Image (cartoon, rainbow, N blue to C red):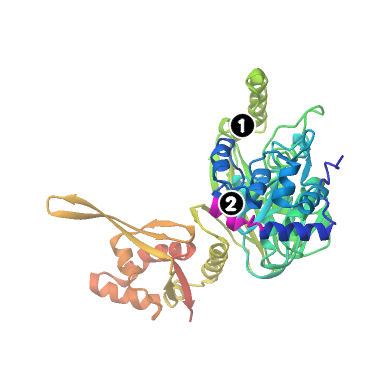
């Protein structure tokens, strides 16, 4: 029987290569799976199985889809006919197929397309799936968000902590020369390494250990993590700890330890990004709480906030669901969570993404924003946000701002809203928006738009304001005072890009 901690033969490189080539020859690739079947990134709902079965032909692609997407068993004779005896044998030898009944085979994992990666995931139909405590989390909302927010510029080294199914670290392999993925779950590392190899990636290394322990003494250009940040009450010895959710630390202690610990492993100029949850503790502003985690770490920090939940809302989201027959136990667990939050004086809980950049000279800065709609990959927009805040914190006076030449971001759009009246249409609103990356939106009044529409990158800001002051018959100093906050916000949110400074 296969070892549940290492179920896949990751060192059988010849078989893995043969299987990869066979999958490609059959068209069982992320692009073709998405084009032909349009499944979700992480799952194929069971209700979709009958429909998809009707669309699959009796060929190699259809056979692989039935096995690894729909979770259906197949007779060995059928597999030999459609896939060939050698591929069937390779799949079984690698641990991807097991016997099911007298002469049938069923898959032990699901393959799912995620961007350009064929991702290996746990599947509910597998007869070899372990207990919940060591199962590897499939693609979650936070995984998708982190993958979308991740910085992906070329670099020498990238590290993913608590890699889980490995997708975020594996996506980093396209831009980093070397990727290290750590996890304290052997099964997660086994699956991650197999996914890397079946996708032909040879620059992903896995290491066993808790968070940063396996890379002690090393420095990286980039660190990314989606750790088990959920604020859970202490568990009795008899209760199972879910490795991908429960940190074992009090309240938001895991998020705090990650934020405090990451900077020591960053090269100067390196970036670290982590999904975190933090508590709003009675009597302490939450900004003060987070800034306390950042003291003396030589890092600039930009926090993008997601939703804030009451303790009851948070418990509803995270208390494990139970069968209807065990509903009294669910109520007891729910109340236990709320009592814990009450003891810890936790009034609310917020989730977010924090991006750190190690910078050892100058005064470090902290910024926070409510995260806007994410429109495609956001890594470049996050880098732009750091550049913008570097510029703003470097301004010595208002004159520096006025002497700067700005360019409008190419993805900026001006949206005018009008409503009908007796004379026709009356303009009722004016808004700027970004159509890529972090999709910030900003309502701008008529004076602000007069200024924004003039900016071409040809002259400094002060020249445009001088012209406007004359046209509007306003004092130049007054126009500067009302325009400067708008310009700074437009720079922070990525609408205006500083080009040339005096």
Give coordinates of residue 216: x percent, y percent.
83, 58
Which picture quadrant has residue 359? bottom right
Residue 419 visible within the image:
yes
In the picture, the quarter occupied by the N terminus is top right
Please report the bounds of the magenta region as a residue range.
26-36
Local SS, label 2? helix
Overall secondary structure of the magenta stretch?
helix
**Residue positioned 67% across, 66% down in the render:** 174
Looking at the image, residue 287 lies above or below residue 318: below
Q: Is residue 30 magenta?
A: yes
Which residue carries the number 1 mark? 315
Local SS, label 1? helix
Give coordinates of residue 295: x percent, y percent.
68, 56
Q: Is residue 317 magenta?
A: no
Q: Nearer the viewer, mark 1 or mark 2?
A: 2
Looking at the image, residue 345 lies above or below residue 453: above
Give coordinates of residue 230: x percent, y percent.
67, 40
Looking at the image, residue 137 lies above or below residue 365: above
Which residue carries the number 2 mark? 145
**Residue positioned 81% across, 63% down in the render:** 218
């Amino acid at each position: 029987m296969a070892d549940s901690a290492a179920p896949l033969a990751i060192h059988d490189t010849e078989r893995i290569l043969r299987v990869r080539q066979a999958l490609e020859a059959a068209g069982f690739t992320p692009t073709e799976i998405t084009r032909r079947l349009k499944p979700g990134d992480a799952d194929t709902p069971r209700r979709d199985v009958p429909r998809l079965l009707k669309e699959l032909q009796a060929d190699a692609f259809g056979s692989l889809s039935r096995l690894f997407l729909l979770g259906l068993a197949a007779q060995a004779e059928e597999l030999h006919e459609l896939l060939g005896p050698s591929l069937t044998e390779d799949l079984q030898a690698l641990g991807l197929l097991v016997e099911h009944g007298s002469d049938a085979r069923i898959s032990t994992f699901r393959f799912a397309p995620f961007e350009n990666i064929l991702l290996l995931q746990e599947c509910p139909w597998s007869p070899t799936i372990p207990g919940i405590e060591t199962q590897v989390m499939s693609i979650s909302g936070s995984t998708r968000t982190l993958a979308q927010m991740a910085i992906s510029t070329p670099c020498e080294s990238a590290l993913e902590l608590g890699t889980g199914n490995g997708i975020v670290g594996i996506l980093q392999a396209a831009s980093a020369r070397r990727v290290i993925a750590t996890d304290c779950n052997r099964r997660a590392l086994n699956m991650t390494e197999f996914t890397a190899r079946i996708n032909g990636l040879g620059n992903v290394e896995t290491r066993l250990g808790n968070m940063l322990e396996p890379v002690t003494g090393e420095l990286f250009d980039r660190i990314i993590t989606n750790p088990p940040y959920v604020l859970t009450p202490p568990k009795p010895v008899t209760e199972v700890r879910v490795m991908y959710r429960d940190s074992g630390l009090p309240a938001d202690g895991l998020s705090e330890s990650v934020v405090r610990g990451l900077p020591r492993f960053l090269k100067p100029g390196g970036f670290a990004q982590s999904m975190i949850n933090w508590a709003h503790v009675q009597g302490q502003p939450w900004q003060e709480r987070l800034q306390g985690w950042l003291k003396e770490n030589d890092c600039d920090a930009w926090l993008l906030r997601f939703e804030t939940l009451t303790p009851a809302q948070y418990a509803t989201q995270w208390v494990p669901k139970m069968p209807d027959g065990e509903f009294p136990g669910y109520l007891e667990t729910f109340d236990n969570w709320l009592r814990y939050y009450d003891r810890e004086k936790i009034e609310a809980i917020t989730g977010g993404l924090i991006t750190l950049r190690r910078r050892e000279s100058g005064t470090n800065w902290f910024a926070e924003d409510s995260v806007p709609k994410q429109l495609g990959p956001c890594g470049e927009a996050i880098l732009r946000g750091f550049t913008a805040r570097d510029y703003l914190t470097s301004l010595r006076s208002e004159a520096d701002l006025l002497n700067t030449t700005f360019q409008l971001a190419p993805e900026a759009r001006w949206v005018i809203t009008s409503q009908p009246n007796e004379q026709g249409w009356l303009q009722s609103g004016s808004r700027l928006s970004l159509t890529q990356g972090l999709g910030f939106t900003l309502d701008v009044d008529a004076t602000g738009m007069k200024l924004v529409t003039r900016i071409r990158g040809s002259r400094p800001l002060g020249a445009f304001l001088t012209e406007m002051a004359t046209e509007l018959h306003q004092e130049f100093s007054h126009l500067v005072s009302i325009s400067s906050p708008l310009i700074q916000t437009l720079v922070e949110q990525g609408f205006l890009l500083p080009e040339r400074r005096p």
